[in-house]
């Protein structure tokens, strides 16, 4: 006799409370701020105070974060930051370290060796070898200039026109071949568009099958409730950091692990859920 139909496995289904279904276009919107967020947390970034028209974007990002939480079963909305807030407080200063001089000398030696091994822009142009990012080469030259006392350039934006207090730090646009920095508040348009179209995360229906891009619903993606919760926290952190009047202190190297998580860790996983 021919075999009967296969009994479905338990993991063939999405489970309410353990998964979240998100429209693909909305997932692209939710991960959109990641580039700006990572740059704002980059170690060494100087202190700044947000001065742009960012109130609406901050509100919409926070609403999107709470919608993710609601899809996981969380009921109580979280408060939205208001007024001037400080989002980075320094618990200690480098001068508090007992062996600061020894650490500084060791760091200078390591930085010198690393920077000297970077190819110059001239060599890259002549050899057509761009295995190293030009920005890395420029940073290496800045390090050598600093160590030799030839320069006091401690921070460099992606473009000299970018003012991080009012502009996105992810880069500039080039309409008609001219560089134009993007105001932070402009990112509100994609969040407003999602709200206008009614896109929002939802809990899966009881018995809803898993979503496979190659043979399932191409308009929706599914993520675990844990990832949805982490994404909500990242969005709320961004909402706080770009709120009008928000003050951020100098970024310490300890922020590197967080930027790595946002961009190459969970950020990469979330970006891979949609088709671009």
Image (spheres, helix red, strand yellow):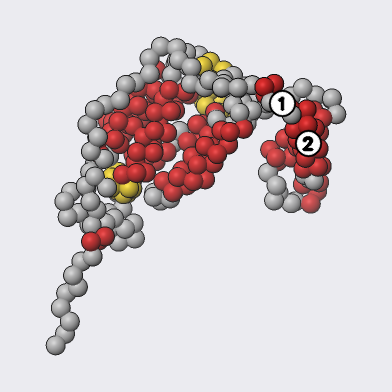
Query: To which residue does mark 2 refer?
Result: 106
168 vs 62, nearest the viewer: 62
Q: Residue at x 36, y 34 (%)?
A: 232
Q: Residues within 10 Å of mark 2 (few under 14, many from 20)?
A: few
Query: The N terminus appears in which quarter of the rendering?
Result: bottom left
Q: Which mark is residue 98?
A: 1
Q: Are marks 2 and 1 in contact (CB under 8 Å)?
A: no
The reply, left or right, for residue 109 in relation to residue 181 is right
Point out residue 123 in the picture as x, y percentages from the top left corner: 81, 46
228 vs 186, nearest the viewer: 228
Reading the chain from its start, which is encountered first: label 2 or label 1? 1
Q: Residues within 10 Å of mark 1 (few under 14, many from 20)?
A: few
How many angstroms separate mark 2 from mark 1 (CA)? 15 Å
Q: Which mark is residue 210?
A: none
63 vs 111, nearest the viewer: 111
In the image, residue 65 sits, relative to residue 13, either above or below, namely above
Q: Residue at x 75, y 32 (%)?
A: 103
Whether residue 132 is visible? yes
Point out residue 28 in the picture as x, y percentages from the top left corner: 39, 41
State the image quarter where residue 11 is shown: bottom left
Whether residue 121 is visible? no
Point out residue 135 in the picture as x, y percentages from the top left corner: 68, 38
In the image, residue 66 sits, relative to residue 129, either above or below, namely above
148 vs 158, nearest the viewer: 148
State the image quarter where residue 230 is shown: top left
């Amino acid at each position: 006799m021919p075999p009967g139909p296969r009994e479905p496995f338990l993991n063939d289904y999405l489970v309410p409370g353990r998964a979240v279904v998100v429209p693909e276009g909305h997932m692209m919107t939710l991960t959109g701020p990641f580039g700006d967020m990572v740059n704002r947390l980059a170690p060494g970034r100087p202190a700044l105070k947000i001065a742009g028209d960012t109130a609406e974007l901050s509100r919409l990002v926070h609403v999107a974060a709470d919608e993710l939480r609601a899809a996981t079963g969380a009921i109580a909305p979280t408060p939205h930051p208001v007024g001037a807030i400080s989002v980075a407080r320094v618990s200690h200063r480098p001068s508090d370290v007992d062996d600061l001089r020894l650490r500084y000398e060791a760091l200078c030696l390591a930085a010198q060796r690393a920077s000297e091994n970077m190819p110059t822009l001239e060599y890259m142009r002549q050899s057509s070898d761009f295995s190293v990012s030009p920005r890395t080469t420029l940073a290496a030259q800045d390090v050598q200039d600093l160590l030799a006392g030839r320069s006091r350039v401690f921070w460099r934006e992606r473009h000299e026109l970018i003012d991080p207090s009012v502009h996105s730090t992810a880069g500039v646009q080039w309409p008609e071949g001219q560089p134009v920095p993007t105001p932070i508040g402009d990112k509100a348009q994609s969040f407003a568009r999602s709200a206008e179209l009614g896109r929002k995360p939802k809990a899966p229906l009881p018995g809803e099958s898993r979503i496979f891009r190659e043979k399932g619903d191409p308009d929706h993606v599914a993520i675990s409730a844990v990832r949805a919760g982490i994404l909500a926290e990242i969005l709320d952190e961004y909402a706080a950091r770009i709120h009008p009047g928000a003050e951020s202190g100098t970024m310490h190297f300890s922020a590197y692990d967080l930027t790595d998580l946002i961009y190459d860790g969970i950020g990469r996983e979330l970006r891979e859920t949609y088709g671009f």
